[in-house]
Image (spheres, grey):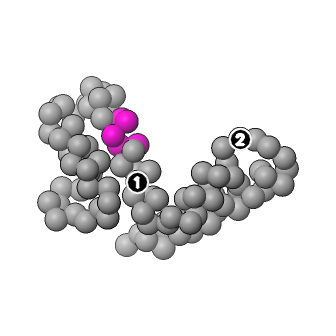
Amino acid sequence: MAQNKNFDVHGCDRLYRALTECHRRIPAGPSREAGCRHLNRSFAECLVTVACPEESDAVRNLCTSGGTALKRRQCHQAQLSLSTCLSNHQT
């Protein structure tokens, strides 16, 4: 997790602060992994939504259930688009 106090999380700041506090309170190891898991997941989902809102929304809408072969293909395409978008944000 980033240690930079000036880390700009664009609307995910409340989750970032909660996750940072969780990491501060619980020593590293399995207890921290279990205790901070829900915050870690929520923060990650928030960042993905901020970075790639349209692609994230498409995955959420198209990949919620198995559905038809067409829906599965659309889900796969949405996942690829999200992956590409996230790759474009990496440094």
**In terms of depth relative to the viewer, which is nearer, 25 or 87?**
25
Using the numbered discs, state the Cα–Cα distance from disc 2 to disc 1 in whole angstroms.
21 Å
Q: Does 38 lie within the magenta span?
A: yes
Q: Amino acid at mark 1?
A: Cys
Q: Residue at x 32, y 64 (%)?
A: 10
> Residue 4, labelled with which disc?
none
Give how far across and how far down residue 55 sits, in percent: 58, 64
Per the rendered image, the range of residues in magenta is: 37-41
Give how far across and how far down residue 31 sits, in percent: 27, 26
Q: Residue at x 22, y 63 (%)?
A: 7
Q: Amino acid at mark 2?
A: Ser
Give how far across and how far down residue 70 sits, in percent: 84, 54
Judge whether 3 appears above or below 86 on screen: above
Q: Mark 2 sits on what residue?
A: 65
Quadrant where the C terminus is found in the figure: bottom left
In the picture, measured across the screen, residue 19 lies left or right of residue 27, that is right
Q: Secondary structure at mark 2?
A: loop
Please report whichever mark, 2 or 1, sits nearer to the chain's N-terminal start.
1
Q: Mark 1 sits on what residue?
A: 46
